[in-house]
Amino acid sequence: MGSIIVGSVLGGAFLAYFCASTTLFFFPSLLHRKKKFLLRVKHISHRGGAGEELENTVAAYQNALKNGTDMLELDVQLSKDGKVVVSHDNNLQRTTGVDTLISQTDYSNLPKIKKELPVQFMKDRVVSIDHDDNVIPTLDEVFEKFPNTPMNIDIKYNSDELIDKVHALISQHNRQHITVWGSMNYKNGEKLYEKDPSIPLFFSPRRVFLTYVLLLTGLLPFWPIKETCYEMCWPSTLIKRANLGHRLPGFVRCFAWLLDRNLVHRALYYHLKRRGVSIYVWVLNDVEDYERAENLGASAIMTDLPSHLSAYYARNAHRSSRDKLIS
């Protein structure tokens, strides 16, 4: 008799939990205030469009804007003399051919970027330039040259000084409303939010994975979300990167495919957008991936090829992922 009562109580509790979770999944505003994120973008240029100009250079940003991008994605480091430098890598061997660290070099002594540079997220593609705009810029310079352009800033490593200086520059240039920031480093992301919760924050990989786990367990509708932009790289994109696909064992590729099909979840995108969170997918460089992102309801695509993505949008102007899911 006792076991029947316990079973009934547990069954009732599970039913109540299931009903509450399902209701809040579709109507999250019953528990959470929807984020008021006014920055609407659908075209983001990764490192300024690294497949068409040298990554993270002024020339790349100019090319991206000329080709219709809505937002520039860039990375920042700190030089030895305390300058906020726009660069993905701290070690400049890949981009300049010089084995030196930005963190151990004064800004004025940083080497120039090579005029021919392989594109990290595009196999067999090399960018070659015939001009002299291959200087590594500072964030202050980029803000000065593009004062009204939305930017997505990746703080590359855990440094209070770097966070403080990036925040000071954002404030100095009055860019809080057109800037998204974040970090691949979870602790860094926590510090950014504590520093200034008014600046939209993107998800770290750890938070992306946690969000998916919460979705599977039904806890996500109850969970507070501090981030504003859900940014993720599909596992399939990583497999395509730098010819990895043909070099990886079959079981690894199979696992990546399964991970991709599970992490890239339409229901998750739906719920996050109902809560005012934008979905940014990176780094997509072919029509097949553009189509998939659109069909899943992504808010924006991040690409190395600004002109290519703009041409895709122009050809498909009658379609919009934002019409498919409630935003």
Image (tube, grey):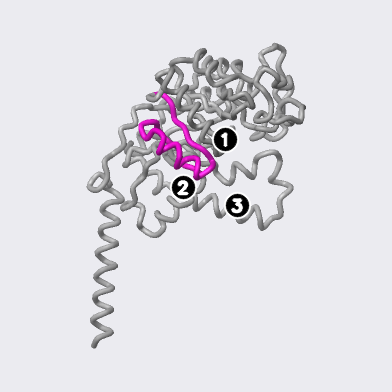
Taking the view exactly as shown, the residue that stands out farthest to the bottom is: 1
Q: From the viewer's perspective, is residue 252 above or below residue 106?
A: below
Q: In front: mark 1 or mark 3?
A: 1
Using the image, determine if residue 296 lies above or below residue 48: below
Residue at figure coordinates x 69%, y 46% from the top left: 245
Q: Which element carries disc 3, helix, strand or loop? A: helix
Kind of residue at disc 2: Arg
How crowded pointer 2 is (Cα within 10 Å; few <14, some 14-19, many 20+) is rated as some
Tell me: 218 left or right of 296: left
- In space, the residues marked 2 and 1 are separated at their CA atoms by 16 Å
Q: Residue at x 69, y 55 (%)?
A: 250
Would you say residue 70 sits in the magenta stretch? no
**In x, y percent, where is residue 313?**
48, 26
The front one of 182 and 259 is: 182
**Residue identified by numbered label 1:** 156
Instruction: Kindly identify which residue carries mark 3.
Output: 256
The residue carrying mark 2 is 207
Q: Residue 183 bears which disc, if any?
A: none
* Other residues around mark 3 within 10 Å, as few (<14) / some (14–19) / many (≥20): some
Q: What is the span of residues highlighted in magenta in the rendered image?
A: 178-204
Q: Viewer-nearest of labels 3 and 2?
A: 2
Q: Earlier in the sequence, mark 3 or mark 2?
A: 2
